[in-house]
Image: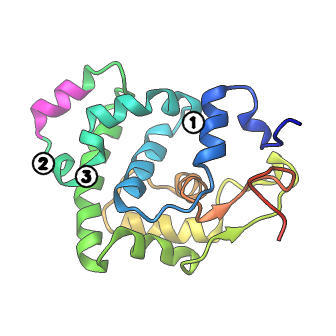
Amino acid sequence: MAIQRCSWADNNPLMAEYHDKEWGTEVHDDRKLFEFLILEGAQAGLSWQTILNKRENYRKAFDNFDATKISRYNQSKVQNLLKDEGIVRNRLKIGATIINASQFLKVKKEFGSFDRYIWQFVNHKPIRNRFKSLSDIPANTKEAEAMSKDLLKRGFKFVGPTICYAFMQAVGMVNDHMVNCFKNAKD
């Protein structure tokens, strides 16, 4: 019997693996949370599949998402990144990654962990939705808007409400697996 999954993940093996093993699964590791925040920002205007295809290149190019190292990138490093065909070569997105690394480190220092900070937007408990169709999923929510507003106030870039909601879905703050999907088991 075939596994029933969300329809967006059915036609590509990499998307299916991401869906089955990661999307909507709770993440509490700060480095992993930072990785998803950066990748979701990189996705702006592109498909998630494009970013997922480049994910390993991003890990290499951005020192495995080590925020301390990234926060120290200089203009020479930026020029090298702009030549790296394995990532999205967008000056604004690369610059945002460096800025976000610095802001991420400030949040970690203030709250003890980025995890403690970011999960407060869902009261430290995943929101579990029961959508029957992809068209039912909103582009953003009040929680994503609150997260976006606070991140922007703290100096983060590429963290609008839609990006924040996609981030929340990716790291399991929101479970938007369809009701018929094996990842949204009935309670």
Q: Which residue is mark 1?
A: 48
Say which residue appears at 61% left-offset and 56% top-offset.
Answer: 169
Secondary structure beneath label 1:
helix
Give, as a three-letter code, the residue at label 3: Ile
Which range is magenta? 74-81
Q: CA distance from mark 2 to mark 1?
A: 28 Å
Q: Which residue is mark 2?
A: 72
- Where is the N terminus found, in terms of image quarters? top right
Give, as a three-letter code, the residue at label 2: Arg
* Most common SS among magenta residues: helix
Look at discs 2 and 3 and give the one toward the viewer: 2
Q: Please tell me in which quadrant of the rendered image residue 118 appears.
A: bottom left
The numbered dot on residue 99 is 3
Q: Earlier in the sequence, mark 3 or mark 1?
A: 1
Q: Please tell me in which quadrant of the rendered image residue 47 appears.
A: top right
* Left or right: residue 97 compared with residue 28: left
* Image location (x, y in percent) of residue 146: 53, 72
* Image location (x, y in percent) of residue 95: 27, 42
* Image location (x, y in percent) of residue 42: 43, 39
Secondary structure beneath label 3:
helix
Q: CA distance from mark 3 to mark 1?
A: 22 Å
- Where is the C terminus found, in terms of image quarters? bottom right
Q: Earlier in the sequence, mark 2 or mark 1?
A: 1
